[in-house]
Amino acid sequence: MSPAHPVNTVNPENTVSPVSPVNPVNPVNAPTFAELYGRPAEGEWAAPGRVNLIGEHTDYNLGFVLPIALPQTVRAQAARRDDGLLRLWSAQGRELVELRLADLAPGAVPGWAGYPAGVVWALRDAGHEVGGADIRLDSDVPSGAGLSSSAALECAVAAAYDGLYGLGRSASELAQLAQRAENAFVGVPCGIMDQMASMCCRPGAALFLDTRDLSARQVPVDLAGAGLALLVLDTRVKHDLGDGAYAALRAGCEKAAGLLGLPALRSLEPAGLADALTRLPEELRPLVRHVVIENARVEAAVAHLDAGDLPALGPVLTAGHASLRDDFRVSCPETDLAVEAAVAAGAHGARMTGGGFGGSVIALVDTGRADHVAAEVTAAFRTAGYAEPRTLTATPAEGARRIR
Ligand code: ADP
Ligand code: MG
């Protein structure tokens, strides 16, 4: 099966007449839904990317996370089909992919279309009687930047299907179906944070999520009121070892939990850490130390937010980065330099966000210093010979919703 041949990807030999492939387009001149599919959309849904304030590599250990949704979203315009076909077009993927629902199976759809197709597969596999659809996707979530464009894509499609087919599923149910699409259909062993963030975040708040039972609390984050801004510095690097390394780290955490007789590392309290470490092989100790203390960092961060002491978040972020760099070892020279340069330029704190091996760094800064901090990080990158980072400002935005 060739990823270079997008039409009828699942079953190249099938008898369905292929839709003409759409040539690469300039997004400004991108075809409309009606131009693609010859009819209007029934509605449009949006789902955001996210940055995680703190709580990294804790979700698959059933611990705590604290993400906010970004204003940047994936949008899905969609209309139902009753002929068993799913047609997908993305202004970023720039190709029309036509799939037969009957052929959807884990691993069968290569490339970007696997994420939306996986959601439809997960819905059907869970017993929801949904048919096909025509879907047009567009996005301003940077892809592959650690800002979770993949979950935004899944959640936009999950919300669209929920609306189109009147399923009435809860946000957390749709998030779990979207995660299943990424785990089982695409084959990425991610935790639940990204999908829960994209589905459940609220404007002006961080989502304090306990990934063990998916209970969550919206914690107000009034950055502007505190005279603060959250810079997102996209290093534009994604180191290849990331994919395999993520699975290996996850396996290491699960192995450690097993050796300790625990269902997950979440069950280990900081008070029991020192003793637990003596019972583990040396190579697993730093992983466990990170996860246990990182969970405590999430609780500390929430306490600072509840107390309205936002600057106190800064050192928590920086300590979290040191742990990801030295213990969990998922940072890289570019993210380390961005953190170091941001803090040296006066940020209250900074850390890499997302799975690591590249991606983005967040920096908590006084509003008046935001430009200075961004300029200093850019200058440090230039000196190091790295590509110029892309800078966004994150304000806690709304989770997945219908927009039209
Ligand atoms: P992240 O989720 O951090 O952005 P991932 O590697 O998990 O990084 O997901 C990026 C992938 O998601 C892309 O390679 C692409 O396959 C898919 N993707 C994201 N946004 C879009 C989009 N707008 N159109 C098509 N595919 C997309
Ligand atoms: Mg992703």
Image: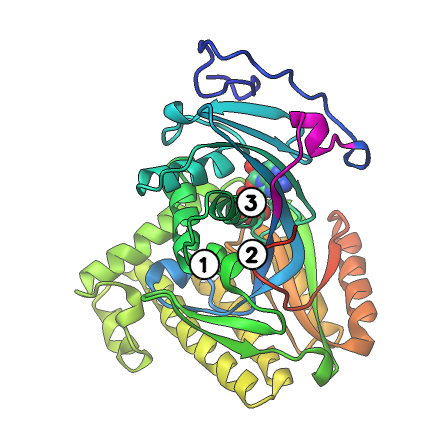
Q: Are marks 1 and 2 in contact (CB under 8 Å)?
A: yes
Label 1: which secondary element: helix
User: Quarter containing ligand 1?
Assistant: top right
Residue 329 in sight here: no
> Residue shown at 55%/47% (left/top)?
156
* Type of amino acid at the residue the image marks with label 1: Ala
Q: Position of residue 297 (x, y in %)?
A: 46, 77
Q: Are marks 3 and 2 in contact (CB under 8 Å)?
A: no
Asked whether mark 3 and ligand 1 are closer than 8 Å, the reply comes as: yes
Of labels 3 and 2, the one closer to you: 2
Q: Position of residue 58 (x, y in %)?
A: 40, 63
Q: Position of residue 10 (x, y in %)?
A: 44, 21
The label shown at residue 171 is: 1
Q: Which residues are magenta?
A: 30-44
Question: Would you say 92 lies left or right of 251 here?
Answer: right
Of labels 3 and 1, the one closer to you: 1
The label shown at residue 400 is: 2
Chain-order first, disc 3 or disc 1: 3
The label shown at residue 153 is: 3
